[in-house]
Image (spheres, coloured by chain):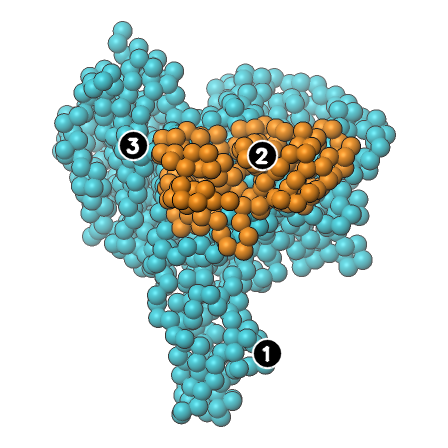
């Protein structure tokens, strides 16, 4: 069946089975492979995307549920320049293998957009829904704390 | 521009990050080939049994299903996967067939491969395969392996595959004359690497050229190519393994698994590209498990606290088959149990038992995590018995700088000797105590504050690295003056491109940005060994240094022809080549690329070392442990990139805390895996361990390689369980609770506390 939604600002449509997840649709049908699939049961958070600004696990959402919605993936968070969060992740060495990173950045972007003053405890609480096996999380938390000022100042995009 | 040794040692931001933070990395699931089909694997749901029949006729009738592959379809002989490390002829019966061959021996063992137009259709087809298995009694653990009549390999006559022995000095004599001996049992539960990116492959067979290309290799591409080529009956050079971005390794990823054969074989049969990506449940029952070791060890100590002897028996539950590196942990636990201490004698036996569980292999700090738990716990128990200060007991027995190089026990029957290369173990030990403020905090030991008992723990460790025999690098000075580096080392998420760029830029005295690193794939260099045993920086980095010398020589020769002089009279100054007032730059030196290849050979391991300390608070009502502070101090000889090294140390410690408190692959008595999702298998999350610190030192350069570096990145994890166990015992000193079995989950610790109170 056909599904049409907005992906990173562009209208897209895809022919999917009813059982196709949003993650598989974005990756396989629409070719945006920055969204990663790590567990397919909603625990690891690597597939997190933004749906109307909310952080959503795209492995737990069906593609057909995205009809007419605004979906943003990691590719949609920056152009040629790194976004403040992306730059902060690099500066603080908040990634090693990089597989979980898109999910952490989309999750953090949703958090800081809504709560630019989130403190360390709040950040850890929200991040506890995403798994990273490489970093031990400490540099990820530092990166997000560091990027907060950009959200507080101009709300980012 | 000339650059003089300015990148190595600097906390350079990683070049990899520029693509990874923007979702522009290419992991194997992101690779697609035109006209590709998809493979899905039917896995045994029975732990132990004899296959009566596999009927896949109905599966083949499903629209979109192209082929179903079973052992019967592979011809007269089902390929077995050889062992990469410590291979012995007597272990061949335990090698895994690529598809279950008459018997199934663990839940998750591949039985058939379905190839279809989409992964969803292939998964649907699994439902239509009728697999008839006559079940046999499952061997679900050590005791059954030793006592049950059920055998995994009837021809072998026993479930014990082999017993390693690690010896040093005369242990029997030491124990006879000792003033004090103490015997304890320790157990480390089955858990594993659990990297975040599921495994996968895309294989493409070019029937006309007779060439096989496989995307998705990691860690040991060249070894895997030899195995794959032999199994497919192809020449090694007709097989190309391509490494793309890799989502974590930690010892488990990149070893040769059944799927490393099955997906290329499927592509050959289908004559179309075939893609396979495992899901998480599949990963948990098919990729190597690890640890799962019990030991019964005894220590002999003199009246003045000198370690005279260490002896005992270790049992490693290796699961159903011996995997490529399945011996590493069981042998390391025997060789490394004495660790950084002078034991006058050692006699440890380590038996590998086959059971009906997923086979095991290396996981970061293999054998050492387990050995250190036993040893560091034992030392604290000795200190308690002898009423000695546990710091003083350690100081008295740490190997002294003056004793270097210091021999480790010799392991047989795959004989290997080893020696600690260098180090000031006492200095690092004291530095850790000072940074940790051990003395100030000692006041809190055993105190009950706000309902929590507070305690401190300590442990020292050694970290082996830089396994031989060699690594290859090829350097190409391109005609535009840029430098391409081709390496046998593999990138598994550790930041290899950045590290090697730093080393190459310094060696060639050119700017960092002029370097491109190409790694992992089998067509980059003639031969390569890859990334395991904390070896890529030392081995790959040293091979770059050797190649850089050769390249400079070639540059001089090339310039000499242009200048009409002797190569010895050409000077290289950054990217400028000069003779007698005439100058050329790298970009106008030659019309063709200048290319050299070099190998760095090494027969001696590097031994990084350190000390870790923990401050914990134990809730006696729930058994929950809060890690209030955790510090690691490690000497790695020489740091290439403090930023990435620090990151790996912290990440490694948190993995160790996961293995200490949370992670457990649980089986029932029928050999069914009970932990098949992230809801059951608990990894550390962002809210679990916020207080971890790491200090890296460059005290003693490694004498055995031109970088002076020691392999690092595994060190953090090694002593964690011992340090935490000691801290918990310290907090509960008044109850004499001795946590000698992992994981230290709240129910287990609560039970220990309750038992101690009764």
- Residue appearing at x 53%, y 49% in the figure: A78
Q: Which residue is the site of mark 1? A: B592
> The N terminus of chain B appears in which quarter of the rendering?
bottom left
- Viewer-proximal residue among B79 and B28: B28
Residue B289: tell me if it is visible.
Answer: yes
Give the vertical position of B555 relative to B78 (above or below). below
Q: Quadrant of residue A65?
A: top right
Residue B281: tell me if it is visible.
Answer: no
Q: Along the horizontal axis of the image, is A31 left or right of B407?
A: right
User: Alpha-carbon distance for marks 2 and 1?
Assistant: 54 Å
Q: Which residue is the site of mark 3? A: B723
Please, what secondary structure does the residue beneath circle 3 have?
helix
Please, what secondary structure does the residue beneath circle 2 have?
loop
User: Which chain did the renderer colour orange?
Assistant: A
Give the vertical position of B685 relative to A94 (above or below). above
User: Alpha-carbon distance for marks 3 and 1?
Assistant: 57 Å
Q: Position of residue B270 (x, y in %)?
A: 79, 44
Tell me whether circle 3 and circle 1 mark residues in contact (CB < 8 Å).
no
- The lab-note entry on whether marks 2 and 3 share a chain reads no
> The C terminus of chain B appears in which quarter of the rendering?
top left
Please, what secondary structure does the residue beneath circle 1 have?
loop
Q: Quadrant of residue B282?
A: top right
Mark nearest the camera among 2 and 3 is: 2
Host chain of mark 1: B
Q: Position of residue B14 (x, y in %)?
A: 44, 54
Q: Along the horizontal axis of the image, is B202 left or right of B372?
A: right
Mark nearest the camera among 2 and 1 is: 2
- The disc placed on residue A52 is 2
Host chain of mark 2: A
Host chain of mark 3: B
User: Which chain did the renderer colour cyan?
Assistant: B
């Amino acid at each position: 069946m056909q599904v049409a939604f907005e992906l990173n600002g562009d209208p897209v449509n895809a022919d999917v089975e009813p059982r196709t997840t949003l993650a598989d649709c974005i990756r396989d049908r629409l070719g945006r492979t920055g969204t990663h699939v790590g567990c397919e049961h909603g625990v690891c958070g690597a597939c997190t995307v933004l749906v109307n600004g909310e952080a959503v696990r795209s492995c737990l959402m069906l593609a057909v549920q995205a009809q007419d919605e605004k979906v943003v993936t990691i590719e949609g968070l920056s152009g040629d320049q790194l976004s403040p969060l992306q730059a902060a992740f690099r500066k603080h060495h908040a990634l090693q293998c990089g597989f979980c990173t898109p999910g952490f950045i989309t999750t953090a972007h949703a958090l800081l957009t809504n709560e630019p003053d989130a403190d360390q405890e709040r950040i850890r609480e929200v991040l506890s829904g995403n798994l990273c096996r490489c970093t031990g999380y400490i540099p990820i938390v530092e990166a997000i704390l560091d990027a907060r000022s950009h959200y507080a100042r101009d709300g980012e995009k | 521009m000339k650059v003089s040794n300015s990148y190595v040692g600097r906390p350079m931001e990683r070049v990899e990050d520029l693509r990874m933070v923007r979702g522009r990395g290419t992991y194997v699931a992101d690779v697609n080939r035109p006209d590709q089909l998809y493979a899905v694997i039917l896995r045994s749901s029975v732990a132990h049994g004899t296959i009566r029949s596999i009927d896949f006729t109905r599966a083949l009738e499903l629209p979109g299903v192209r082929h179903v592959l079973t052992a019967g379809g592979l011809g007269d002989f089902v390929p077995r996967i050889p062992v990469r490390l410590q291979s012995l002829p007597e272990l061949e019966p335990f090698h895994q067939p690529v598809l279950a061959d008459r018997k199934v021996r663990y839940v998750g063992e591949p039985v058939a491969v379905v190839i279809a137009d989409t992964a969803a259709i292939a998964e649907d087809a699994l439902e239509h395969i009728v697999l008839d298995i006559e079940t046999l009694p499952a061997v679900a653990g050590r005791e059954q392996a030793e006592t049950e009549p059920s055998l995994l390999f009837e021809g072998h006559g026993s479930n014990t595959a082999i017993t390693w022995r690690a010896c040093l000095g005369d242990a029997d004599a030491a124990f006879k004359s000792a003033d004090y001996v103490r015997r304890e049992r320790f157990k480390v539960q089955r858990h594993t690497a659990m990297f975040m990116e599921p495994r996968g492959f895309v294989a493409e067979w070019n029937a006309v050229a007779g060439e096989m290309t496989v995307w998705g290799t990691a860690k040991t591409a060249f070894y895997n190519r030899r195995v794959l080529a032999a199994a497919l009956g192809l020449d090694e050079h007709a097989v190309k393994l391509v490494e793309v971005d890799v989502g974590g390794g930690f010892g488990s990823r990149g070893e040769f698994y059944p799927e490393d054969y099955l997906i290329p074989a499927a592509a050959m049969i289908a004559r179309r590209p075939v893609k396979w990506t495992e899901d998480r449940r599949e990963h948990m029952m098919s990729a190597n498990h690890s640890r799962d070791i019990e030991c019964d060890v005894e220590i002999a100590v003199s009246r003045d606290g000198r370690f005279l002897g260490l002896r005992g028996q270790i049992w490693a539950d290796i699961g159903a088959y011996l995997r490529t590196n399945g011996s590493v942990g069981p042998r390391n636990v025997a060789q490394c149990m004495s660790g950084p201490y002078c034991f006058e004698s050692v006699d440890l036996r380590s038996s590998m038992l086959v059971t009906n569980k997923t086979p095991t292999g290396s996981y970061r700090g293999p054998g050492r995590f387990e050995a250190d738990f036993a040893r560091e716990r034992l030392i604290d128990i000795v200190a308690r018995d002898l009423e000695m200060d546990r710091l003083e007991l350690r100081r008295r027995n740490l190997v002294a700088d003056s004793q270097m190089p210091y021999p480790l026990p010799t392991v047989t029957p795959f004989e290997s000797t080893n020696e600690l290369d260098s180090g000031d173990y006492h200095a690092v030990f004291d530095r850790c105590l000072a940074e940790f403020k051990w003395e100030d905090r000692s006041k809190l030991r055993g105190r009950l504050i706000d309902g929590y008992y507070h305690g401190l723990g300590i442990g020292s460790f050694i970290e082996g690295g830089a396994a031989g025999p060699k690594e290859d690098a090829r350097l190409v000075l391109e005609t535009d003056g840029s430098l391409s580096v081709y390496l046998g080392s593999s990138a598994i998420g550790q930041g290899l491109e950045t590290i090697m760029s730093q080393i190459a830029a310094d060696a060639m005295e050119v700017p960092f940005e002029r370097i491109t690193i190409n790694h992992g794939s089998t067509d980059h260099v003639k031969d390569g060994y890859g990334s395991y045993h904390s070896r890529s920086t030392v081995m790959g980095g040293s091979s770059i240094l050797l190649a850089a010398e050769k390249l400079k020589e070639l540059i001089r020769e090339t310039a000499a022809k242009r200048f009409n002089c002797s190569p010895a009279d050409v000077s290289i100054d950054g990217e400028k080549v000069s003779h007698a007032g005439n100058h050329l730059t790298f970009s106008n030196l030659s019309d063709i690329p200048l290319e050299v290849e070099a190998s760095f050979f090494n027969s001696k391991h590097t031994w990084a070392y350190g000390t870790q300390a923990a401050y914990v608070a134990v809730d006696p009502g729930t058994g929950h442990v809060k890690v209030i502070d955790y510090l690691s101090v490690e000497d790695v000889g020489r740091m290439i990139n403090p930023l990435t090294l620090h990151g790996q140390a912290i990440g490694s410690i948190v993995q160790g805390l996961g293995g200490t408190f949370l992670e457990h692959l649980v089986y029932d008595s029928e050999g069914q895996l009970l932990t098949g999702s992230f809801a059951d298998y608990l990894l550390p999350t962002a809210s679990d361990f916020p207080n971890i610190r790491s200090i890296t030192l460059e005290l003693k350069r490694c004498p055995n390689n031109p970088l002076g570096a020691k392999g690092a990145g595994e060190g953090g994890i090694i002593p964690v369980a011992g340090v935490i166990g000691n801290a918990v015992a310290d907090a509960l000193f008044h109850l004499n609770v001795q946590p000698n079995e992992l994981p230290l989950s709240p129910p287990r610790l609560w039970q220990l506390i309750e038992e101690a109170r009764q």
